[in-house]
Image (cartoon, helix red, strand yellow):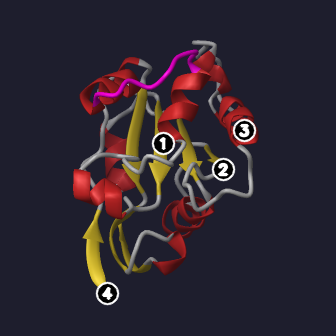
Amino acid sequence: MNRERSFAPLINPQSHTLILGSLPGAESLRRQQYYAHPQNAFWRVVYAVFGGSPDEDYALRCQFILSNNLALWDVCGSAERVGSADSKIARIEPNDIAGLLSGCANIRRIVLNGRKAEKEYRRFFGSLSVPAVYAPSTSPAFAALPFGDKLAAWRDALRYIRLRNLKPLD
């Protein structure tokens, strides 16, 4: 089994919503980019929530995330895994999410991308005070839910941000 490591967080001082995945897949690791697999719906979903289409250039995608006050990271700092399936993740060492949050006072909500991210977040960080909500996995491995349903769920998870309304988050 290979020991894989997540990327550094993509965040700036204005970020108020942290999106957490589980661990980058093989294609993301190869390209050193968040959500690099062409069938992963993450970029299409997030851009659609804000009324756009994904940029081809990864640097512009990162700029898009930050300009919308979002941040990206993973629950798993490192883990063993064969392939890209979340079900194959083992021996997890979590990222220091509590440390990140203590240094980023504007983070007011966490969106968990998929059940594995949710499960491991709750296991390692369930006592954190920042509200965390589940959103269906954008991974191509989660094909049971059609794109439109994923988009609707993500719109709901990001509803305050989409409206650019910083009301208290539930």
The CA distance from mark 2 to mark 3 is 7 Å
Establish if 88 lies above or below 157.
Answer: below
Q: Nearer the viewer, residue 149 or 117?
A: 149
Asked whether, in this view, residue 106 is left or right of residue 134, the answer is left
Relative depth, front residue between 8 and 85: 85
Q: In which quadrant will I find the C terminus?
A: top right
Earlier residue among tags 1 and 4: 4
Q: Which residue is mark 3?
A: 153
Q: Are marks 1 and 2 in contact (CB under 8 Å)?
A: no
- Amino acid at circle 3: Ala
Q: Which residue is mark 4?
A: 1
Q: Are marks 2 and 3 in contact (CB under 8 Å)?
A: yes
Badge 4 element: loop
Callout 4: 10 Å neighbours few (<14), some, many (20+)? few
Q: Which residue is mark 1?
A: 19
Q: Position of residue 11 (x, y in %)?
A: 31, 34
Location of the N terminus by quadrant is bottom left
Residue 131 in picture, x, y percent from top left: 61, 43
Indicate which disc residue 136 carries. 2
Residue drawn at x 56%, y 18% is: 50
Q: Are marks 1 and 4 in contact (CB under 8 Å)?
A: no
Q: Distance between the Cα atoms at labels 1 and 2?
A: 12 Å
Label 3: element kind = helix
Other-residue count near label 2 (Cα within 10 Å), few / some / many at <14 / 14–19 / ≥20: many
Q: Image quarter for residue 24?
A: bottom left
User: Which numbered disc, 4 or 2, marks the residue that appears first in the sequence?
Assistant: 4
Residue 59: x and y in percent read 25, 28
User: Which span of residues is magenta-colored?
Assistant: 50-57
Residue occupying image coordinates x 39% and y 35%: 71
